[in-house]
C-alpha cells in the first residue's frame, strides 16, 4: 500500500517552528512495519490511504484532501472529541524519520486530568488521569532531550515517581503543558530541582486562585537552588482581561520570571479571542511591555480603548 500523511499544522505554519505530530509518527511506524510505502501527502499523487491530523481548531482545512481521508485530532470539529488511535498503532514507537529536523523525543507518561476546567478539553478527550508510559519507553537513543506533553503529571503518584526516577539519568526534559503549582510540595520541589531541564520549569496560572500556589512554588524551588528566571508561567487570558492583568502584576516582581499569555480560543464552543485579549497577549505580554508598566498604563499610553 502507498500511504500519504498530512500534518495540517506543518502545512499551515510553513515558516514557523514545527512540532512533530506524535499520532502521524506512530501511524508511519505501523505502516512501515507492514511493508507499506509512507510519504507526505501530495495532492496530485494517488494513495491507497491518506491520514490527516489537525491539532488546532484555528488551523484551516485543506480543501484538496480526498473525501475518504482518515482524519483525526482535536482540530477537526466534526469528529468525536474522544477519538483515539487503535491500540496496535498507539503502542508503536514513533517514526522520527518523517521529521528529520526534530532532535528530541516526545510523548506522554500520563494521560488525562482530574480537573474539569471550563477551557480545557482533556478530561472529555482522555478521561481521568492514569499511567500511560514509562520515560524509558519514550526516550530516543540518538538524543538526550525529552519533551513531555502530560497535561497534569503531578496529579498522580505514578507521574511523580517517573519524574523522580529520571534524576541522574542524563536526560534533559521539558514539560511543555505547564504543571499545576497547587500540587507542588517540598518533596516535589526537590525532585523538580534535581532534574535536568532543557530550558524552563513550566507552570500554569489560569485564574487568580493559582497566584499564591505559584508564589509558594517559586519560593520552594528557590530554597532548592532554582532561581525564578528558570520558571515559565502560562497565563490564560479570558474576556476578563483585568483578571489576567492582576495575575501579571502579582508575578512580574520575581526577577526575570518568564510570563506567557494565551488568549482563550475554543472554536468547538464558538470561543474566539477579542481585540483586547489579542492586544494583551501579543503586544503587552509577548512584547515585554508588562515588565515596565501596568495594563492600564499601557492602554493609556497606546490610546487603546476596549
Image (cartoon, helix red, strand yellow):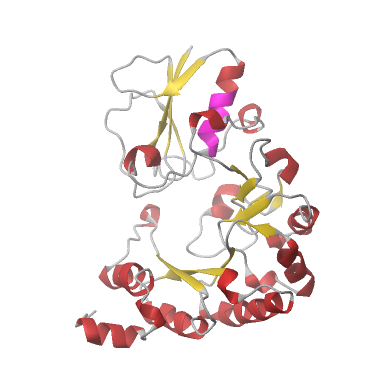
Q: Is residue 46 magenta?
A: no
* Of residues 237 and 200, the one drawn nearer to the viewer in this rendering: 200
Span shown in magenta:
22-29
* Position of residue 269 measured from the top left corner of the image (x, y, whole percent): 38, 57
Instruction: Tell me the residue at 34%/70% (across/down).
Output: 287
The foreground one among 269 and 223 is 223
Asked where in the image residue 14 lies, by quadrant, the reply is top left
How many labels, in total?
Answer: 0
Question: Vertically, is 158 above or below 93?
Answer: below
Percent coordinates x, y for residue 217 in the rendering: 66, 76
Query: In percent of the image, x 32 and y 16: which residue is there?
Result: 45
Q: Quadrant of residue 12?
A: top left
Q: Position of residue 72 (x, y in %)?
A: 46, 36
Q: Is residue 82 left or right of residue 55?
A: right
Q: Residue at x 60, y 14 (%)?
A: 34
Q: Main secondary structure of the magenta part?
A: helix
- 28 vs 123: above or below: above
x and y percentages locating residue 124 in the rendered image:
55, 52
Amino acid at each position: 500500500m502507498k500511504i500519504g500523511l498530512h500534518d495540517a499544522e506543518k502545512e499551515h505554519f510553513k515558516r514557523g517552528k514545527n512540532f512533530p505530530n506524535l499520532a502521524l509518527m506512530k501511524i508511519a511506524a505501523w505502516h512501515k512495519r507492514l511493508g507499506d510505502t509512507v510519504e507526505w501527502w501530495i495532492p496530485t499523487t494517488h494513495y491507497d490511504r491518506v491520514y490527516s491530523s489537525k491539532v488546532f481548531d484555528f488551523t484551516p482545512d485543506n480543501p484538496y484532501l480526498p473525501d475518504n481521508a482518515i482524519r483525526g485530532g482535536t482540530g477537526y470539529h466534526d469528529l468525536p472529541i474522544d477519538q483515539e488511535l487503535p491500540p496496535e498503532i498507539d503502542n508503536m514507537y514513533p517514526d522520527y524519520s518523517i521529521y528529520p529536523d526534530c532532535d528530541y523525543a516526545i510523548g506522554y507518561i500520563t494521560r488525562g486530568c482530574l480537573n474539569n476546567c471550563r477551557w480545557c478539553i482533556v478530561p472529555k478527550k482522555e478521561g481521568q488521569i492514569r499511567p500511560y508510559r514509562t520515560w524509558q519507553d519514550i526516550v530516543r537513543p540518538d538524543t538526550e532531550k525529552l519533551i513531555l506533553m502530560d497535561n497534569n503529571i503531578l496529579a498522580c503518584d505514578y507521574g511523580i515517581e517517573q519524574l523522580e526516577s529520571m534524576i541522574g539519568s542524563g536526560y534533559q526534559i521539558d514539560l511543555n503543558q505547564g504543571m499545576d503549582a497547587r500540587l507542588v510540595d517540598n518533596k516535589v520541589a526537590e525532585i523538580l530541582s534535581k532534574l535536568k531541564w532543557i530550558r524552563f520549569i513550566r507552570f500554569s496560572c489560569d485564574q487568580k486562585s493559582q497566584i499564591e500556589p505559584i508564589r509558594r512554588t517559586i519560593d520552594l524551588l528557590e530554597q532548592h537552588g532554582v532561581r525564578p528566571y528558570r520558571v515559565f508561567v502560562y497565563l490564560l487570558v479570558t474576556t476578563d482581561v483585568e483578571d489576567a492583568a492582576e495575575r501579571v502584576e502579582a508575578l512580574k516582581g520575581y526577577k526575570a520570571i518568564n510570563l506567557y499569555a494565551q488568549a482563550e480560543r475554543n472554536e468547538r464552543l464558538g470561543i474566539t479571542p477579542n481585540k483586547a485579549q489579542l492586544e494583551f497577549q501579543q503586544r503587552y505580554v509577548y512584547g515585554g511591555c508588562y515588565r515596565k508598566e501596568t495594563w492600564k498604563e499601557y492602554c493609556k499610553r497606546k490610546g487603546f480603548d476596549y
